[in-house]
Amino acid sequence: MKEFALKYGCNPNQKPSRIYMQDGSELPVQVLNGRPGYINFLDALNGWQLVRELKEATGLPAAASFKHVSPAGAAVGLPLTEVEKKIYWVDDMGELTPLASAYARARGADRMSSFGDFISLSDVCDAAAARLVKREVSDGIIAPGYEPEALEILKSKKKGNYNVIQIDPAYRPDPVEHKQVFGVTFEQGRNELKIDRDLLNNVVTKNKDIPDSGKIDLIISLITLKYTQSNSVCYAKGGQAIGIGAGQQSRIHCTRLAGQKADNWYLRQNPKVLALPFLDKVGRADRDNAIDLYIGAEYRDLLADGSWQRVFKEKPEVFTEEEKRAWLDQNQDVALGSDAFFPFGDNIERARKSGVKYIAQPGGSIRDDQVIETCDKYGIAMCFTGIRLFHH
């Protein structure tokens, strides 16, 4: 296939639209089912790069959940705890393969943002991963291949219209890339930076101890940031991103946004949340929405107007701010990556409220000393990578 006609571009009025190779060669992708659109392919190709690099860096199967050209979640295939199975709604699926576990983590980090995602898998999609994908609201998937049973499962999704893309894992693009904006062509060298443990050697804080688990999480956060619209920061723990703040003009707003998502991920594990008495008819997406309200300030409004009766069998107890803070204080050993330097220590102050213990950032601010001093105040280990990871 040398070109693929798209229904339209970013918006329905942007026609014609297609993908093709400028040199006239074959596309490195095949559409096995459905008709992916312009944004679908942007998500698919960015997501594929992310999971391929995660696999290369960790040796583990990887998955990403993309929305609007930024990851909502990214993870490697580590086994799930019983609590994680519950908060990701996979506790009824039996034992998951590593690839299915990777997607459960990627999807589960921020289920509100992952609703209607485009999925990227580093490995050949197996039946277990396909069964998990089938039950979620998703626009499509890209992988280097599909087991026959997995492909049949995916083809049956969305009344046979689910987008399934296969990419050639051996494909490597030219080292120079181009894009057009307002008729002007931009050219740059591709960002081929390899992210591995060597980037984490320059620890500039008094605490120099970053265990191997922390290094893996920092690598996951940095590779995730490499394909996240800037400005961006990423909190990671246990082999997955748990909070991604993308596309904010201010770094402290990135840190706050991603920190709130990381907090929500941890609050979902509280016994009060796990025990919410949902009506049997309430589906996973509506449960996600209700949980988001329950752990937020809006829940008092639900109690006041009786809206809780639409989703719960009985009125749940209020999850107080004091209870939330006490629970969040138990979250520890979180890793945080930033795509550019932290200009002020306020980012560290916010990060430590979400359990951050390890940080990787480029360094280079005129206030680096202030940022290091703030880390030292809380015993946080921080390394300077010397590398910026802006993505636009």
Image (cartoon, rainbow, N blue to C red):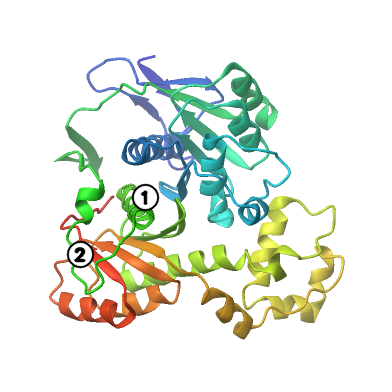
Residue 115 position within the rendered picture, expressed as x and y whole percent measured from the top left: 59, 49
Using the image, tell me which numbered label, if any, was put on residue 203.
Answer: 2
Q: Going by the image, does 338 lie left or right of 203?
A: right
Quarter holding residue 244: bottom left
Of residues 42 and 213, the one nearer the viewer is: 213
- Using a 10 Å C-alpha cutoff, classify the residue at mark 2 as few (fewer than 14 neighbours), some (14 to 19) or many (20 or more): some
For this rendering, which residue is in front, 66 or 150?
A: 150
Identify which amino acid the numbered label 1 is placed on. Ile
Q: CA distance from mark 2 to mark 1?
A: 18 Å
In the picture, the quarter occupied by the N terminus is top left
What is the quadrant of residue 385 in the picture?
bottom left
Where residue 220 is drawn, which disc sits there?
1
Q: Position of residue 53 (x, y in %)?
A: 33, 38
The residue at the point 53 percent across, 21 percent down is 146
Foreground disc of the pair 2, 1:
2
User: What secondary structure is marked by label 2?
Assistant: loop
Q: Identify the residue at image location x=76%, y=51%.
A: 283
**Position of 309 relative to 58 (above/below):** below
Horizontally, is 303 left or right of 354 in the view?
right
- Residue drawn at x 65%, y 52% as measured from the top left: 82
Q: Give percent across and percent down for residue 302.
A: 75, 75
Q: Which mark is on residue 228?
A: none
Amino acid at pointer 2: Val
**Circle 1 SS class:** helix
Whether 194 is drawn above or below 347: the answer is above
- Is 21 placed above or below 374 here? above
**Residue at point 14% right, 67% down?**
364
Q: Is residue 61 above or below residue 319?
A: above
Residue 39 appears anywhere in the view: yes
